[in-house]
Image: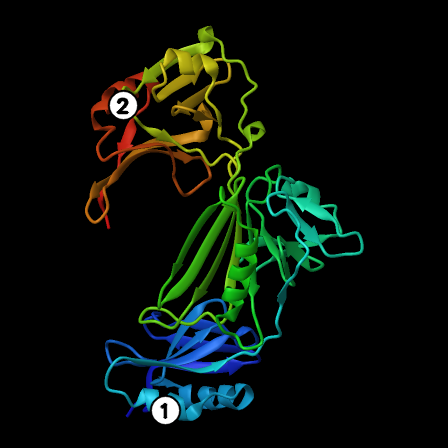
Amino acid sequence: MRFRETDEGEIIIEGNVLHCKHKYNIYNSTVNIDKLEYVYGLVNANNQALLFCFDSHQHRIPVEFKGFKKAYNYLSDILGFNNDLFHKTMNQNQKAKARIWKRDYNKNYKTIDSIFDFSIGFSIQNLNSEIIEWDRPANLFHKSDLAEFVTNEYNQECIKFSSKVKVGNIEVDDFFGHVGKRDDSPILYFTAKLRNECGDHNSYFDAKESINKLKKTDDFYSLYEREDQNSLTWERDGISKSITYWYNSEHGYESCYTSLVIRNKREYPQLYRNNEILKKNSLTSLYIFNLPLWSRDNYKEDITIKEKPKIMKGLSKGFPCVWINKDKNTIGFGGQTFCQEFLINEIESIHLQNIHPAKGSGASYLELKLNGIERRQYVLSGKYQDFDNQIKNLEKALDRKIVIEKEYADV
């Protein structure tokens, strides 16, 4: 009964791609066969039988779709599925899950005795053993032969280093830097997948041992090891190194590799320093919020986020505020430390979005709709309904109507 195919969906293979097309689009998938890492057979809580495929994305392929048997047999022939285990799993009348295949990889890392100070940066293992500091701006890689810019499987721009990389006392074959929106900012996020020949959790314990050899008393160190995952985070001088391995569990699948993530948490004041001098007589309007609100502060990703001008800090006495600068023809939105300024004629509309408490605590956002940009962006945020009593006075100060959006629940 499990494999009686219906017309609710269709599965076809073209070249190295499996296409799953569903009448109601729920199970639409495009699976890259060459990139498959592991495959499971599973029966879900609704007693529906599925083939779960992971190629850096999760795909659930219903076994009753037209063409499934032909596609399954083809994949099994070229990859070598455990067919007995698959059929045994499919015959269960309750939730069940079993891995029927995983790809074999060569070991792509090694732990080493020589140590390079992790807090400084990492070392490219080329002829010159070139050192790359964590503080190095991303734009300096554009003219470098040490790395190339690539797009990863999640359509993100990355830097792929041309040689092996030594991070602390572990050497990694494939190391990626994830490029942000500011190329004058350092790369804030690096990743690697640590694999051994068995595709098991020993890659995690190797990396854990290497970290334990380096950690000092003053370093931040967090560790939890559970049935569903092992995770360790180690931080020194604003640089965080995390390793995680996932096990097969009720809601997850064994990763077969250890995820290595480096995060740069350092502050770079030169990126948000505001060198423009705002004169008091340039202000045509100033509205001060006498309550705590938050401005956006991710200046390492957004070049429009700057330090709040000194004169505004004084005039607002540290409170959030909104002002109009007649000389620049701009509206400024400032929190306690940071601010953003926008040309008046580039702001299509200003919106208030309340999110009422439910599972979450709720929130309130003052948002802008900019010309030519579909999605609104928030400039100030607060607790639920924080802005409600401010709207009339704010509209008067800005000489603009504020659009009140329909509330929704914080679920």
Residue 228, picture quadrant = bottom left
Give left or right: position of 225 versus 151.
Answer: left
Q: Is residue 157 above or below residue 209?
A: above
Query: Is residue 382 visible to us here?
Result: yes
Distance between the Cα atoms at labels 1 and 2?
Answer: 63 Å
Q: Could you say where residue 27 lies in the image, as x and y percent from the top left?
A: 36, 72
Q: Is residue 366 above or below residue 148?
A: above
Assign a secondary structure to mark 1: helix
Q: Amino acid at mark 2?
A: Leu
What residue is at 33 percent from the left and 87 percent from the top? Answer: 89
N-terminal-most mark, 1 or 2: 1
Residue placed under numbered mark 1 in the picture = 87
Coloring applied to the structure: rainbow
Q: Tell me the kind of residue under disc 1.
A: His
Does 149 sit above or below residue 204?
Answer: above
Residue occupying the far front of the picture: 217
Number of labelled discs?
2
Q: Residue at x 38, y 25 (%)?
A: 335
Would residue 2 be found to the left or right of residue 78 on screen? left
Quadrant of image for the N terminus: bottom left
